[in-house]
Amino acid sequence: MAPSVVFLFPGQGSQSVGMGKAFFDGYVSVRRLFQEASDLLKKDLAKLCFEDRDSTLVQTDQVQPAITLVNLAVLQVLREEGLSPAASAGHSLGEYAALCAAGVLSFGDTMRLVQIRGAAMKEAAERHPGGMIAVFGLDREALSGICRDVKETGSVEVANHNSPLQVVLTGEKQALQKAGELAKQRGAKLVVPLKVSGPWHSRFMAEAKESMRQALQDCALGRPRSR
């Protein structure tokens, strides 16, 4: 019996210009997906993924549909090659591709939702500028302490607890910079700014919830299924 395989879909920060190009060139089905999504969102997603600059692709209203489309294009190719997931999961934005893979969301609804999500988050980030950093070598408890230590400078929070020694912080730029400096002073092996355009997974994103709540009410949700 073939082993069970779980698909884990990445989210924002994993993008790069040219992502998905090999699949686009090699599979008619992928080109159809790109055309369908571009028509639906009134956006040239092939140009965005393959030709636009990093500075364009990093913008959340651009990158969310782009990454999601590439995620679903890879899913399409894997299925064509005979590999389907026994389960699916996603990292932040990647959860939407995982829901599509599991049959909870249709392709069209998935693309519409991430378009709305990206626009809502962009609006929130314009009102509350910030960013994110990945910290290697300090645990969550130590970084939570650093967040408290910089609160007079601004708001910083633990965003993603990716592993015992890889934690992402999110928040206002000046406070985030100070948190990164403190992390290095207290033993962090590496502090990496993420390729994002706002303080995702922070309290500042609460303003985006209502747009998503309304959009989700218009979607038909299926029962999750494997394979």
Image (cartoon, rainbow, N blue to C red):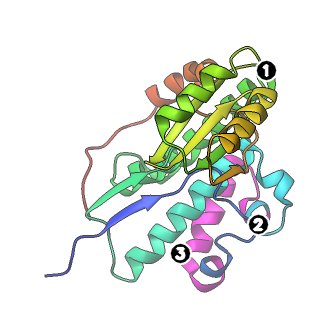
The residue singled out by tag 2 in the image is 17
Which element carries disc 2, helix, strand or loop? loop
Q: In the rendered structure, are the residues bearing label 2 and label 1 in contact, judged by CB atoms less than 8 Å apart? A: no
Quarter of the image with the N terminus in it = bottom left
How far apart are labels 3 and 2 at the CA level? Answer: 21 Å
On residue 127, the disc is 1
Q: Quadrant of residue 32?
A: bottom right
Left or right placement of residue 86 versus residue 94 in this view: left
The residue lying toward the viewer, choosing from 70 and 220, is 70
- Residue at coordinates 50% horizontally, 51% vertically from top-left? 94
Q: Position of residue 125 (x, y in %)?
A: 74, 28
Left or right placement of residue 63 versus residue 147 in this view: right
Left or right placement of residue 90 versus residue 21 in this view: left
The residue lying toward the viewer, choosing from 197 and 193, is 193
181 is higher (above) or lower (below) than 203: below
The residue lying toward the viewer, choosing from 8 and 35, is 8
Q: Which residues are magenta?
A: 24-47
Q: Which comes sooner in the sequence, label 2 or label 1? A: 2
Which element carries disc 1, helix, strand or loop? helix
On residue 29, the disc is 3
How far apart are labels 1 and 3 at the CA level? Answer: 40 Å
Q: Which comes sooner in the sequence, label 3 or label 2? A: 2
On residue 66, the disc is none
Q: Residue furthest front?
A: 186
- Residue at coordinates 56% horizontally, 26% vertically from top-left? 145
Packing grade of label 2 (10 A; few <14, some 14-19, many >=20) is: some
